[in-house]
Image: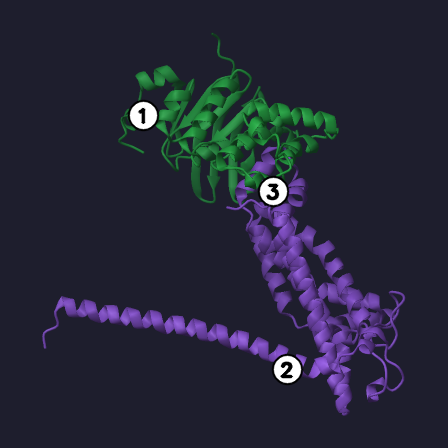
Amino acid sequence: MENETKIRIENLNLSIGKSKILKDINVEIPKHKITVILGPSGCGKTTLLKSMNRLTDIYSDIRVSGKILIDGEDILHTDKDVTEIRKRMGLLSQRPYPLPMNIYKNIAFGLKISGRRKKRFLNKRIEHYLKQANLWNEVKDRLKEPAASLSIGQQQRLCLARGLAVDPDIILADEPTSALDPISSQEIEKKFTELKNGYTIVLVTHILRQAIRLADYVIFMYLGEVIEQGPAEQFFKSPQTEITKAYLKGSIN
Amino acid sequence: MRISTGNIFRLRKTWWRFEETFFRSLMIFSSMVIVGVLLLIIFSIMKTGIPALSFEMLTQTPKGGFYFGKEGGILNAIVGSAYLAVGATGLALSIGLPVAIFMNTWLLKHKKTVNIIRFILDLLWGVPSIIYGAIGFMIMIMLGLKTSLLAGIIVVGMFILPIMIRAIDEALKTSPSGLTEASLSLGSTKSELGFKVLAKQCFPGIITAVLLSFGRAIGDAASVLFTTGFTDNIPTSLTQPTATLPLSIFFQLTSPIPEVKNRAYAAAVVLTIIILLTSILSRVFSNRYKKHSIKF
């Protein structure tokens, strides 16, 4: 099967103040696959992920150079509004951050700021996305309750539904199961394997087992550099570099 | 004498216990002093004030000879203070909320600038209100304006603005960056982030800021001294001079007649009750919205 590239990152360098966080990143992320960015804590995985939807823009002292091409368009140097770029990507963070509103409005928020205001349309879409995140049956009778009243696993699924509702084609997930219990984690993982048919998923994790379970394509990072990348099977069965071998054996974490 | 390790250990333990007891007693003592002083103030106001408080005082404007112990009330000052404090708080909120949101969304990228702004606001917070009054008065003279409710609202509004901004700013600062990122990644603009997400998340904090500012606005005498003037009538337009409770208390307290002096305490009781009521109301109001805030 042919691999179409969805995101291509060329010579990306990123520094915060005087410390270089990302050094000469060159990666290709295939379309409609789960790409796992793997690596020990503090190696720049999250920063790489956040630079893809330009969340790095909002903080001070960050300098970025290089190119991030999404469908061939460089999102770091474009006339397009940054909100347009961000709408193409749903973000799941390390722990769920539901918006300070009720469950219904949490999902309606993204639709409303995109100009969809018709009640009937909203109701239909909200039901659709809650079902897609396997949350509908649990919340259909309490849509007006605050999102904060949900359990943390439910909140994460709400965040997934909320992200899907703005109709992205990419899902960026930053260790989305790290705050969840094993059962909720499993549900999220299962969801990802279902979703990859329609979405390009980029998943950051430091859990090796999770990477093995989910990955189609792996990017291994260490101290701000990409050490190795390739299809999952090749990566896990015959790693090319010493660092990767050591990591897979468990001697680096 | 031989000192064994066991002895040293026991000695240390005694010392730790003493230290703990000492500091705990100190904390309890300080808390009691603060609460005691507060109760003393409230008690002394109530003791003289409540007997002098009458229905007439709350419902009538001063009649001729009021300040010499004749008939009348302080309705002019109650209504005036309410107009002034509500107006000034409204003005400060409508300027302060956008500024605080601006500092916590657009200016996230410019940490240094924000810190300079915070520093300046903290300085302004510390400027005595009489300075604001004097500057307001100076400008009014330059423009040839008379004392009025509007001038008072503007000057008091400026005076509580730094308090309002910094208090809201502190509330917004507690909002986690993950929430900011979540909102932005949904494609929200920075103003949608600020007004629809952060303001909601920090609603209880904003209420506290409004309350704090309102308390300062209604209780301050120096800034209104030159700017709103004083009158025995209830103002019917923004351009008329207006009486305020703190000044009313001041004028009555300086009277040599004991009956008038007692009325000053009654006015102080009214002022205290107004502040107490707004405080309780805003608590109730902010609790209604607290359920939406995400706890971290």
Distance from Cα at disc 1 to Cα at disc 2:
77 Å
Q: Identify residue type, mark 2.
A: Ser
For the N terminus of chain B, the image quarter is: bottom left
Label 2 close to label 3 by CB (< 8 Å): no
| Side of B27 where B152 appears, left or right | right
| Side of B294 where A240 appears, left or right | left
Helix, strand or loop for disc 1: helix
| Side of A164 where B157 appears, left or right | right
Residue closest to the eye, B44 or A8: B44
Residue placed under numbered mark 3 in the picture:
A100
Look at the image and give the colour of chain A: green
The mark found on residue B44 in the picture is: 2
Residue placed under numbered mark 1 in the picture:
A244
In the displayed orientation, state which residue is furthest to the left. B2
Please tell me whether residue B246 is drawn above or below residue B209 in the rendered image.
Answer: below
Q: Nearer the viewer, mark 2 or mark 3?
A: 2
Q: Nearer the viewer, mark 1 or mark 3?
A: 3
Chain identifier of the residue bearing label 3 in the image: A
